[in-house]
Structure formats: C-alpha cells, structure tokens
Amino acid sequence: MHKNIKIISLLLLLFPSLLFSGEAPPILWMKGYGTGSQEIGESVVKTADGGFAVAGYRYTFGSGKREQVFIVRTDANGDSLWTREFGGEKDDQAFSIDKTDDGGLIIAGMTRSMGAGNHDLYIIRADSNGDTIWTKTYGFLNNDQANSVRCTRDGGFIAAGWTTDSTSAYHIYIVRTDSLGDSLWTKIYDLDGRNPMAHSITQTSDGGFAVTGNDAGHRYNWAFLMRLDSLGDTLWTKCYQRMALGKSVQQTNDDGFIITGWADPDTGIPVIRTDSFGDTLWTRIYPSTDDIGLGHSITNVRDGGYAFTGNHIGAMVIYRINEDGDILWFKKIERQGGNQGNSIKQTSDGGYIVAGSGAVSDSVGTGPDLFMVRLAPDGTEIKNGKPEASFKQKKYSLSYDLKGRSVNITFTMPTSANVSLVVYDSQGREVKVLVDKYLDKGSHTIKWNTKRDRRKAAAGGVYFLKLSANGHTVFKKVTIVR
C-alpha cells in the first residue's frame, strides 16, 4: 500500500541570487532631507493625513555643539511640510518617534543640554505642526538614553533604553508616563550577564510590554526578549544565542513575537520568530552568506508575514518574508557613500515607507542626508509612468490538491496567453514540463503523476511549481513526504 503524500502549500519567492526570485514592488519616490550637514533618520511614523514624520538628528562637523534633534514632516509624496530642531546648547539626539491620539508626535532620545546627568533620557511632545507641547528629562547622575518610545492605550507613553551606574555598567531602563510626561513608574532591570540594554519596546495585547535588546554578559552578546506586565514587573525573559542584539520587536497576530537585529558573528541579518512565551519557532539569517548585515526594524504586514530593513555593507536592504520566514522579495538600494535602512512601516495603501540615511543619487556631497524611500504595494508594476496592479493582483491563481500519488494543479488566468507550467526540484533542476502551449482565459486543471516521474527524482522532498504567462511568474512550493 502506498503511503499518503502530504503537501504543504507556501508562496515561494526565494533570495534574489537563487533561481526563484520574487520581484520587489517599484519605488514610488526616494528623497533626501538635509542642509549640507549630515542628517540621520532613525525612526518613521505614518501621520493621520497619509504623510510621514521622521525623527533623527543632524550632525555638524567642527568644534562645539555637533548633534541636534532633527524632525522632518512630509506629505504622502515625500514633499517636506516642515522641519524642526529640538535641544539646547550641547549634543541632543532622537532615536524614536510615534504618533499621538491627537495627531501630534512623541519623540525620544537623549540630551546633554539639560537634565541631571552627563546625558539624560529625553522625551519631547509636539503638536501636528511640530511645535513643542512639553519636554521632559529622566535619569540619574550618569548616562541615560531612550532608544524606543511608544504611545500606550491609556494615552500615556513608555520609553525603553539604558542607564549607567557609577562603575559605567549598563542596565535596562524603562520609564512609563502619563499624557503630560509625569512618571507613573520607572524600572531598572539586570539580566544574568552584565551591561544589558533595551533597544525596542512594544505594548502587547494584554496591556503589558515586550522588550528586546542585548546582554553582554556572556562570551558573546546575546539578544533577549523580556515580557512585562502593565506595571513593569517581569513575567519572563529569554535569550537567543543566534542573535547578538535585538534591535526591533513586534507582537504577531497569534500573540507571539518577531525580532530582528544583529548576528554574532556578523553573517547576515537575523530574524527570530517566537511563540507567546518567547520559545523559538524559527530563526533565519538573511542572506545565508558571510556578508555582514544588520537588521534595524521589522513590521507586521496586514495580509500576513513581515517586512524588515537594515543594511548590508553600505547598502540599504528591504526584505518581505512570509509567516514561515521564506523570502517573498528583496530590494537593495545603494548609492555612493552608502545607504542604511533604520525604520520601516507599512503604508495605508499596502506599500512600505523606509527611513534611514544615505544619498538619493551618486553625486558626491558633504555627508549623507536623512533619507526616505516609498515602495508601492506588493504586486504593483509601473506602466506608462503610473502604478498598476500586476499579474498576481489580476486574479491569477495557482493551487493544487492530492489524489493518491497524483497532484491536481489548478490555475486561473484572466486573459488568454501562452502558458508554461514546470516542476523543479530543490536544486533548481527541471523535473517535468506540465504545460507549454496557448490556453484560453479561465480555469485549467493539470495532473502531475509523481509515480511516473520517479526516475526524475520525484521522490519525497521539496519541489517548486513555476507558472509563467504574459511575462509574469507565480511560484508554489510543494513538500512531498513519502
């Protein structure tokens, strides 16, 4: 008696250097914002009118004050509506921004211009025009900094970062405030090692928080994920050896978590997917080569999966992956002087906005600008200078079911076309051509009898269906278990 064949259907679009490569959506616009100094964009947020706000800092070469909090507010097309600078006579930086319920902005980072210590955790609340509502500093006599700030559901705010003590050791530092910036609670956390720092915080579905960062107390840095209740008390903490530093965390739709950051040693951008208790479901390194890569920001995508950004050896990279970590598409942006992606969000139309630093063109300048790039939604093409729904969005479909050792493959086409449907093995070798002819629009079903193809390696393993028509391609991954 034959064993059943089990088929798992996944959308396949692998890393661009391999055979099955997904096409990234086109760039709608790419713009730099600067004044001849060096501007760094650290964090981007969508605004209520469809535009964007980016927080970072301006670096001025020379003596004296060199760093200033720098905020850029744009419309949906990336055209600047206003820019603002915050701070005092000494160095000040912003690393995170979020949108408040009244359409304003909350900004966090560090200041040397005010506060109790050498530099203090710094929070600015501004209205929709960028005018200051209030500023607050938090900290002790040494160094304190916020790397991440979020609005809480009660109208207040939470900021996470680090503080140092008199021995210069680092500790996780989290401050929760009300809507006026007055502290509700302040917590300092230490892990098993030494020098832990928080880099990202998000509020969870139960009203608590998830925090990621790094703990330098082991032989190598280890990333951690820490769960807190609404009062800041620790529920659990997990460390991950394959990630040296957790830079960005989001809660997933099933109450688990997705984290990106830096690997140790540097071999690519790591992403870790966990369950609701922080136990690892899968870990991936993108790409799986020895290229140095740093992941800076990850976001949930509304129709499933995730998008993240970072940099590979001077180039901004953007990845779109499914819920199992398979790459759907990849985009690389590299100009003279280098580009870096620091923050990514999905836009209201299903596209993506990425902020960071770099040059828009290859012309030589005095330093990189605060940089933003907007991508169209998945499956969009540019035709006649305008975005247009692509092959997949025009209701082309590819699916299958199992009957014994046969796979019934069904595909639907909105227009008549010359069609190619080919089966490949996991090494990219052709196994069988199922269709190679002109077909009318509509639904078609083709049978692949895997038993007859045993001499062509149709044994248990991974196979790929490749459907091509009208210059477009759709893939399906098939896993056969004997």
Image (cartoon, rainbow, N blue to C red):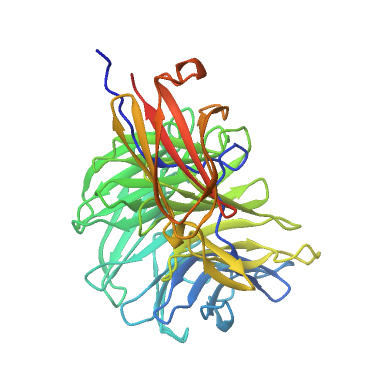
Q: In this view of the protein, which residue sits in the foreground, 389 or 95?
A: 389
Q: Residue furthest top?
A: 1
Position of residue 376 relative to residue 294, above or below, is: below
Q: Residue at x 41, y 76 (%)?
A: 105
Q: Is residue 278 left or right of residue 289?
A: left
Q: In this view of the protein, which residue sits in the foreground, 306 or 182?
A: 306
**How many numbered marks have been drawn onto this rendered protein structure?**
0
How far across and down, in percent of the image, does residue 256 sit? 28, 46
* Quadrant where the image shows the C terminus: top left
Q: Is residue 396 left or right of residue 420?
A: left
Position of residue 207 relative to residue 277, above or below, is: below
How far across and down, in percent of the image, does residue 289 sit? 60, 33
How far across and down, in percent of the image, does residue 87 sit? 53, 75
User: Is residue 380 at all visible to an observer of this figure?
Assistant: yes
Position of residue 294 relative to residue 5, above or below, is: below
Q: Residue furthest right?
A: 364
Q: Residue at x 60, y 67 (%)?
A: 382
* Quadrant where the image shows the N terminus: top left
Q: Is residue 102 left or right of residue 283?
A: left
User: Is residue 112 at all visible to an observer of this figure?
Assistant: no
How far across and down, in percent of the image, does residue 412 sit? 41, 52
Q: Is residue 405 left or right of residue 97?
A: left
